[in-house]
Each structure stands twice: as C-alpha cells, then as structure tokens.
C-alpha cells in the first residue's frame, strides 16, 4: 500500500486552531510594531511628541490644515516636538528661541531643504535655488540674485516700471469703480505682481486685468504650490518611490513643465533677436544674465525664473489680499492707515506714492507686519533637513529629519503676543520688531542663509500697492456680506491662501 495513504489528516478542530492562531498573530503583529515604536520613542533622545499608529505614525494628527493641528499639539508637547509621518521623522519648532538655535546657532547643519518627491520628479530640486543642496551651485545662484536682481542699485533703477504697474492697477480699480463692478483683490494683486516681475525680468507684460487674463498662470502657480505641500505616499514611505498612487507627483511635474515652456520661449526669442544683430537692449534681468552665459546656462535661467515667479507672485498677492481683508473688517484700522497715507500726500506735489516714501508710512508698515504675523505667506517656511545628527535643547535631531518651523503658530502664541488673535497694527508702532531675519518672533521670509532673497523687492511692492489702494478708494464687500463677516478661512499649501477670494466694490474718495 502507498505510504501516502497512511498520512493522517489534521483534525478539523486542529485546522480551526491554526486559523485562529494565524488571525490572532495577524492582529497582534501591528500592535507589537506599535508597542516597539512607542518603546523606542520613550527610550530615544528624540524631542517629545504624540504616540503614533503602526505604519502611518502621526499622519491622522497632521490633518488637512497641519499648521493649525501642529500648533495645538505643540501646546501639549512643547515648542520642540517630534512626529512620525509614515516612516519619516519630522521635527516641529514653534518658539523664537528654539528657531534661533536652529537657524542661527546651527544654521549650517540645517542648511539643506527637504524636497518632496513631487519636486524631485522633474529634477526641480537639482536646479531650483529653493530646493537644491547648499553647495557651489546654490552659492552661485544666491550671488547672482543679489547682484543682478535684488541689490539696492538694481531695485532703485527699476522703480519707475513698478510705479507704472501700480498705476495700471489703480486705473483698473478706477474703471471698476466707474462701472460699479466688484474687484477680486487677490487676482488683481496677482496680475500686478506678475507684470512687475515680468517687466523687471523680460520687459514685457505677461497678463492683462480681467477675469481670465491671468487665470491660467495663476492656476499653474497655485496648483503647483498645493501639490508641492501635500506629502504623497512616496514621501511618507520611501519604499514606494517608484510609485505615485495619488498622482500628485505627475501633476506637479506638469505644472512645472508648462511654466518652463513659457520661459523657454521668452529666452529663445531674446536669443534670436540677439543673433539677428538687432542692437536694441532692454537692460533687464534677462539681458544681464545672458551676458553671463559662460557661467550661467539657459537651464539655470529657466529654473531661476520658475522659482522667482512661483515665489514672488503668489506670496505678494496673497499678503495684499489678507491685509485688505483685515483692514476692511476693521474700519478703525482702515481709517488710521488712510490717515497715514493722507498725511504723507499732503506734502507731495504729485499724486503717486513712491518707494522712498515707505519710511514715512509708519502705520502702513505696522499693517504689513501685523498681516504677516497673523497670515504668514508660508506657514512652515520651506522645510529644512538635518545634514547630520544635531543635539538641540538636550534632544537629538537625527540626520535627514525634516524640520518644520511653524511661524503661523508663533504668530498666534499668547506667550509672545498679547491678544494674539486680534488684528492690532498698533503693537508694532512702539516695538522695533522687523521681518528681515533678526527678530525671530517674526520671520515670514525665513532667517539665516536660506531666507528669501526677494525680501527687499516684496517689501517695496507690498507697501506701495497697499498704500495706493487705500489712498484713492473706499471699499464695500460685494453682495449682502457685512464687512465684519468676511470669510477668513484658510486654504493650505506651501503658501497660505484665503479659502474664499475677497470680492469688494471700490468707491472713489
């Protein structure tokens, strides 16, 4: 007889026991991983933070508005906090003293940026001054931006064109006033910012005022900002780098390529004009960079323009929209701001506000600071990355950890600001706090070697545009909404947008 016929089959009860054991082990496995993870956290030297779930870590606590949810967590775990987002360690800082230690004392150790996979797919992290590693190429780009774009001499030389573009905005608002049409403040400010930059860079307008003129370009910028801020699965779990289940990486790649195509055409048209022997020179930034072709390639230029237009248009227009929203919601603050401008203009013969007047507009300066305190353009700045293990405040920040500086939380911290939720520009009239990287209570442009190189240009644009809008016009919210009921909800991205655009009807003063 065949031996196989003598094999005893397992009793059905045994099979059930094996199945039960398998199910129990399957359920216990993630719990064991969870327990081990928490044990490792308790016995590590990482900063304190909430216990995470198996595999996903603290993703559920991150939320769709992480600047708000992490501010709440920091109240419990402190201003130096650690999280697990998937398999990645994230350090959240939310106090001026600790921020200074990171971005001043240990600035070199945190000089690199944490680039999401959405940025890496198109190799933007290799060419963009925002994302690239802090090496020789980054230093070269920083030097070029300082010398050829944002030096005091270059900005002074280009002031007339900015004044012209601001006047075009005033003319557009005046036309809306005549026709009784509502103005989309954010979109109009975006058009102004876009044309200021495009004339500064290329001596051309890229848009006209109107509901559809800048829509395509603005959509590319906003969608790129939002996609780049959302962690995709490959960011959370490096094992999935070759996959993109949510489609976030591909969408970001499309946005970037469309914008690069715009800049390629502009550069190629200028090169053709030069090769045809046309002697006309614009002496704009593009001409200056083309003169440096031996050390500055066309690929360098196109990515630099992509970075500057992404960062410069969105942040400026968003800040102006928040500032106007706050002033319209607070009529007494609007009155004080207008008196500040009126006092200046009484002593001037011409009707335009110039950049040299900014130092005299003390209340307008306070309004801009207060707006950036409550509504920082980038709520986490641009995330940094630890170059190596660093000891801070008695804890270890491990190599490759992502660093989020929650400037939104610092701006609303009652330990730093009195009545932090109130819009009170007056708080800056007697306190010498500025946003140029030295006062860590207020760093909307960042601090240290990685702070925004376009700060000086943004500073000039914000003050002149805001002062011009409130000097010439009064404002009424469109529809039946009362001014104090303006929706101040936020839409999260790399930059912080208003969830609902500010629609107002201008009235001549």
Image (cartoon, rainbow, N blue to C red):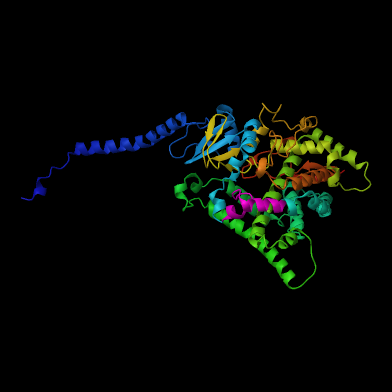
Viewer-closest of 322 and 231:
231
Position of residue 278 in the picture relative to residue 499 (left or right): right
Position of residue 100 in the picture relative to residue 162 (left or right): left
Q: Position of residue 335 (x, y in %)?
A: 84, 35
Q: Please say whether residue 136 is one of the residues in the magenta stretch.
A: yes
Is residue 202 placed above or below 487 in the rendered structure? below
Asked whether residue 209 is in view, the answer is: no
Quadrant occupied by the C terminus: top right
- Quadrant location of residue 29? top left
Viewer-closest of 433 and 480:
433
Viewer-closest of 111 and 253:
111
Q: Position of residue 414 (x, y in %)?
A: 67, 27
Viewer-closest of 427 and 81:
81
Q: Position of residue 207 (x, y in %)?
A: 74, 58
Q: Position of residue 433 (x, y in %)?
A: 75, 33
Residue positioned 24% across, 38% down in the render:
18
- Quadrant location of residue 329? top right
- The part of the chain drawn in magenta is 123-145
Asked whether residue 226 is in view, the answer is: yes
Q: Main SS of the magenta segment? A: helix
Position of residue 489 in the picture relative to residue 37 (left or right): right
Q: Please say whether residue 210 is one of the residues in the magenta stretch.
A: no
Is residue 417 placed above or below 290 in the rendered structure? above
């Amino acid at each position: 007889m065949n031996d196989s016929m003598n094999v005893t089959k397992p009793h059905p009860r045994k099979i059930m026991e094996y199945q039960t054991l398998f199910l129990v082990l399957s359920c216990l496995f993630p719990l064991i991983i969870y327990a081990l993870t928490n044990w490792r956290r308790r016995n590590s030297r990482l900063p304190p933070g909430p216990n995470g779930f198996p595999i996903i870590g603290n993703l559920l606590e991150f939320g769709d508005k992480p600047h708000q949810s992490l501010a709440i967590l920091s109240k419990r775990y402190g201003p130096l906090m650690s999280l697990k987002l998937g398999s990645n360690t994230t350090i959240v800082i939310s106090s001026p003293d600790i921020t200074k230690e990171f971005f001043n004392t240990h600035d070199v150790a945190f000089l690199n940026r944490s680039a999401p996979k959405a940025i890496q797919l198109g190799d933007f992290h290799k060419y963009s001054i925002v994302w690239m590693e802090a090496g020789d190429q980054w230093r070269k780009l920083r030097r070029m931006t300082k010398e050829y774009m944002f030096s005091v001499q270059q900005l002074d030389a280009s002031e007339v064109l900015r004044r012209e573009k601001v006047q075009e905005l005033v003319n557009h608002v005046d036309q809306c006033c005549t026709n009784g049409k509502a103005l989309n403040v954010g979109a109009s400010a975006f058009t102004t910012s876009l044309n200021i930059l495009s004339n500064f860079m290329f001596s051309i307008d890229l848009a006209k005022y109107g509901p559809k003129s800048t829509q395509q370009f603005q959509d590319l910028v906003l969608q790129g900002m939002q996609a780049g801020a959302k962690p995709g699965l490959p960011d959370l779990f490096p094992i999935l780098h070759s996959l993109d289940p949510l489609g976030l990486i591909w969408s970001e790649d499309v946005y970037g390529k469309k914008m690069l195509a715009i800049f390629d055409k502009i550069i190629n048209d200028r090169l053709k004009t030069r090769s045809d022997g046309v002697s006309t020179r614009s002496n704009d930034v593009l001409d200056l960079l083309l003169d440096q072709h031996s050390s500055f390639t066309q690929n360098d230029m196109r990515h630099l323009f992509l970075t500057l237009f992404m960062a410069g248009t969105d942040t400026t227009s968003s800040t102006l929209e928040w500032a106007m929203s706050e002033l319209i919601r607070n009529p007494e603050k609007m009155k004080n701001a207008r008196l500040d401008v009126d006092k200046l203009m009484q002593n001037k013969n011409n009707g335009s506000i110039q950049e040299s007047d900014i130092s005299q507009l003390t209340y307008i300066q306070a309004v801009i600071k207060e707006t950036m305190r409550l509504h920082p353009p980038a709520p986490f700045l641009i995330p940094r990355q630890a170059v190596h293990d660093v000891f801070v405040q008695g804890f270890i920040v491990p190599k490759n950890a992502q660093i989020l500086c929650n400037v939104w939380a610092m701006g609303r911290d009652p330990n730093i600001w009195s009545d932090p939720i109130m819009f009170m520009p007056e708080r800056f009239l007697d306190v010498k706090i500025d946003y140029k990287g030295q006062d860590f209570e207020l760093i909307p442009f960042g601090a240290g070697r990685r702070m925004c190189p376009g700060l000086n240009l943004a500073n000039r644009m914000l003050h002149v545009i805001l002062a011009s809008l409130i000097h010439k016009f009064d404002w009424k919210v469109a529809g039946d909404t009362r001014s104090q009921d303006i929706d101040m909800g936020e839409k999260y991205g790399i930059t912080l947008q208003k969830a609902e655009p500010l629609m107002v009807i201008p009235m001549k003063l």
